Image: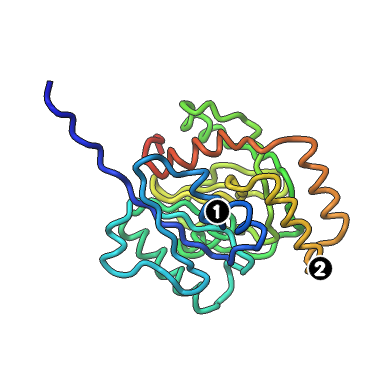
Amino acid sequence: MGIEEKKRSKTFGVLLCAEDSDYVKKTHGGYFGVFADLLAEEGDEWRLYRAVRGELPRGDEIDRFDGFVVTGSCSDAHGNDAWILDLVDLLRNLVEKRKKVLGICFGHQILCRALGGKTGRAKAWDLGVTCIHPSPSTIRLLSSLNIPPHLPVIECHRDEVCELPPQAEVMAKSEKTGIEMFRYGDYIMGIQGHPEYSKDILLNLIDRLLQCNLIQNFHAEAARASITIKNPDRESWKQLCKGFLKGTLPL
């Protein structure tokens, strides 16, 4: 029997669009650690770029990566801060190179913007555990994952995708949000929710939003109540996100 060829390891980049909270640094090693816990497999190489500080891969460095994850943020995807505009330019470059890009929350919205869609303020906060509803075509497309028709995920957003980019397809919606997921070809996917979040991260985030007067008590109470009613389907989300990045999903 011949020597089996060693499988090439894959390299992924996390484009971090928010500063780590003290709580997440202490309990999870920062948001980079949260994403690695959800997505990393043995043999992978993961690299962190703090996009919110202007750290981005440049030039030929991009070609070394198999894919990227764009994280959530406290900033608005329709804003014009210098780092946001630089990120939009990078994402357009990644699209041209047909690199796999997974956008989460702000990342979902900024991908939409980079592709020519529109984002803006939603009518109300979506905070807590929300059930999203994959489209029939998405359920058929991902039949190997046995994705359920009601898929709980942790949400924390007051912005949303208002208009899809040309040639993009809605993959899921919810009662509050018309575009919970979208894809563009087989290499771009956006998710409005937070598959990477655990309940403790959400509870700490609710407390911080209250302290900053960004939400009212009724928002916090409803979000906390949602956690007791249903659990985010972390395993389904893990399979979906990993399958997309690794190219094993039939998109």
**Numbered mark located on residue 104 in the image:** 1
Residue 249 can be seen, yes or no: yes
Residue 87 x/y as whole percent: 46, 69
Q: Residue at x 56, y 49 (%)?
A: 191
> Which residue, given by chain and number where applicable, does mark 2 sit on?
213
In the picture, the quarter occupied by the C terminus is top left
Q: Nearer the viewer, mark 1 or mark 2?
A: 2
N-terminal of the pair, mark 1 or mark 2, is: 1
Front position in the image: 129 or 121? 129
Q: Quadrant of the N terminus?
A: top left
Residue 98, image x, y percentages? 33, 54
Q: CA distance from mark 1 to mark 2?
A: 24 Å
State whether residue 67 appears in this view. no
Q: Secondary structure at mark 2?
A: loop
Horizontal arrangement in the rendering, residue 91 relative to residue 81 (left or right): left
Q: Residues within 10 Å of mark 1 (few under 14, many from 20)?
A: many
